[in-house]
Image (cartoon, coloured by chain):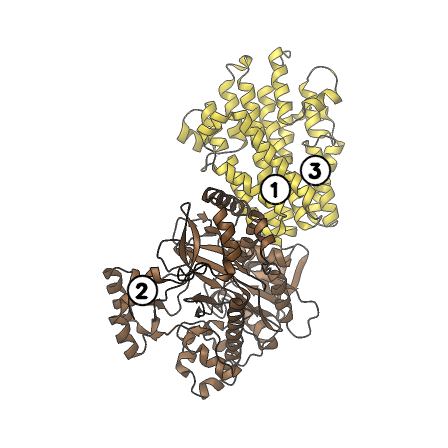
Chain colours: A brown, B yellow
Amino acid sequence: MKNIRLGDAFDEMNGLQDGVRKAYHTYQKWLDAISHDRLAEKHQQADLIFRRLGITFSVYGSEEGVERLIPFDVIPRILDAEEWKIVGTGVCQRVRAINAFLDDIYHEQHILKAGRIPANLVLNNPGFRPEVLGLDLPRGVYVHVAGVDVVRVSAEDFYVLEDNARVPSGVSYMLENRETMMKLFPELFAQHSVAPVNHYPEMLLRTLRSVAPPGIIDPTVVVMTPGHFNSAYFEHAFLSMQMGVELVEGQDLFVEDDTVFMRTTSGPRRVDVIYRRIDDDFIDPLSFDANSMLGVPGLLSVVRNGRVSLANAIGTGVADDKAIYCFVPDMIEFYLGEKPILKNVPTFRCAIEDDRGYVVDHLEELVVKEVGGSGGYGMLVGPMSTAEQRSDFRHKILADPDNFIAQPTLNLSTVPTLVDGKIAPRHVDLRPYVLTGETTQVVPGGLTRVALRDGSLVVNSSQGGGTKDTWVLES
Amino acid sequence: MLGRTANNVYWMARYVERAENLARLLASTYHMSLLPAASGNNQLQWEAPLQLAGDREDFITRFGEASPGNVLSYMALDPDNASSIRCSIRLARENARATRPELTTEVWEGINQTYLELEAMSYPKMVDQGFREFFDWVKERSHLFRGAIYGTMRRGDAFTFSRLGTFIERADNTARFLAIKWDMLSPAGRPMAAEDYYRWGALLRAFSAFKAYREVYSGIIEPRRVAELLVLRRDMPRSLFACTGEVNDILLQLRENAACTRLSGQINERLQRNRIDGILRSGLPRFLNGFIARNNELHGMIGQEFMLVL
């Protein structure tokens, strides 16, 4: 590995400075013709729209109750139909394999018996839930909603960074970004044939209804939120509204006669499918974290008896663990008999002595992550780090090697972005949202996150990242 | 609808109504304080808003005297006065946010916009813009809120419980407002003077009732008739009887045999049977205080019946 030079990054509009790429032909002409002042004006209008809609998030660890906007960039990220075909089929393939894997490890555990994945990595994983061993789920689906993080390093090369199989968020931004772009730039949508995404809530509702407990004809679906102080509350409210289902908190639900009910103004009403936006740990204080005020006492036993469905199912965390991640290509071959369409980033598991030795010696080249971490917290980006940060991580890794993995620093692709009134390249990733019920499907595009600081590779909103609308052009 | 959500919608409407009525009281007090004839009485006038809402001791500790500027700042914008207009709107918006999926875009964006503009408001800005303009703005935002609910919400639970919140709160506020002002304004034996005319006129305007008074009663403004208009007339949208009538209609529709519906029927019937002279004989403030207590009892029973508030 050599140290990266960001000047080399593949730009999705300009390639390697070798001419405007196909997907951007029309857009680039439009962009050249519009003044930067006018763009900046549109940018401000977008801010106003988001603020009025109340699309804000709370930042953990900052002042209590502070609501912020996720910065939105008015320059879209554009993929043509062929590019999307690779990404779209690739993420669906991964999610099919992950669902097969989860069904297997909670039943016969063929993959462990075949020695394709070390058993202790699965069975001793904090995300593995022995409570649901042997439990048969409707359609055998565990991950109904996945948000697969994909990055690109060249015209052809897409890598998956994470599979996010627990409670992925951000889809409301995908939808609101599109709404806002259509308000701001109707003329662009007349010139481009952009694949629509607005049917996502409908697809989600169909997905959720399709996994209701057996025998339920007209299932009652709810969205379960930790409450309006949660950073993703806007999204929970948004989805429940778009689907036309109740938004419940733990306190609104109770268990009686092996059934989950919600407390309504006209008495208890039975609930069949819970799209829960709350982690396993907090879902049932009788079975998991006893201090949880967010969950529903007794919920797990109703789940176990197949009388209510949770989406995602309990125990999916084992599949989006960063150590298990290394084995997703094996899962694809083992369960589907297919070749992986998207690449995995080579990953060093610090639990393995040889890997660990390499990692601590090459910290300035690597990205180090906590195995169970998310949101860009607790991460070291080697090439951008100080000697002090590296020494700090060296100690952390040696003290608790099982908790860390490392990957080469990928030179993520860039997309032109409006920064301080000027257009400059900024690194991006892409999170398509994959739904699994009767089938596994994905709406074209997803959420593009952009690292707004010059040279930064961290796109998380909690770390100063922004978002863009993602266009998939219909051929 | 979820019981918790019904509770959120109900309180959202209560807080908006509370903000509006406080703006009405402050606007009226400010207006009266500009009348020269009111001199000598001025200090007392500015105490009235503190009695209606707010914590008088807290105010005295922090501000000292009840000067117009102090009271206006404390009652309109103080983030530490839980009854201020700013806090009421914050709580209204917080309740709206907690039940966002039940609201139409118009209702949510309206209340969110009100909140955002009020957060950007400071005392110097309010002085610069003019107190009257500020209070008019609060009233307008409240009208817009109710109008958006009335014009865009499906006639379901969210609509119903927000209406319930509006009228329970308005009944309470009208009664409190009137109870405080009654003693302060009553000429106590002496004949009505010119200044009294202005004061009672200002009071009527605070309830948007000046024009209605002229329509209903010809002739000069008499305290007795002002009381009748604001307590017993069903056709006056801010009167006690109008509010209890609305509440009772809603509850009859929701659950005819509930305990809260029976209580609301009694409260309503009592106002229907009463005559203003009878009420005045035993003292209007006493009557109003009794009403406030029963209205509050009704609020508690509604919570138990529908919102699982224990």
Gap between marks 2 and 3 measured at Cα:
73 Å
Q: Are marks 3 and 1 in contact (CB under 8 Å)?
A: no
Rendered image: mark on residue B244:
3
- Mark 1 — on which chain does it sit? B
Residue density around tag 2, few if under 14, some if 14–19, many if 20 or more, within 10 Å: few
Residues at marks 1 and 2, common chain? no
Horizontal and vertical percent for residue A82? 53, 68
Horizontal and vertical percent for residue B122? 45, 32
Residue density around tag 3, few if under 14, some if 14–19, many if 20 or more, within 10 Å: many
Instruction: Looking at the picture, tell me which residue is in the foreground, A396 or A227.
Output: A396
Q: Are marks 1 and 2 in contact (CB under 8 Å)?
A: no
- The part of the image, by quadrant, that contains residue A14 is bottom left
Q: Is residue A305 above or below residue B240?
A: below
The kind of secondary structure element at disc 1 is helix
- Determine the residue positioned at 55% across, 51% down: A181
- Determine the residue positioned at 63% across, 15% down: B197
Which residue is tagged 2? A4
Q: Nearer the viewer, mark 2 or mark 3?
A: 2
- Mark 3 — on which chain does it sit? B
Mark with earlier residue (3, 1): 1
- The part of the image, by quadrant, that contains residue A210 is bottom right
Q: Is A98 displayed left or right of B196 in the figure?
A: left
Horizontal and vertical percent for residue A165? 49, 69
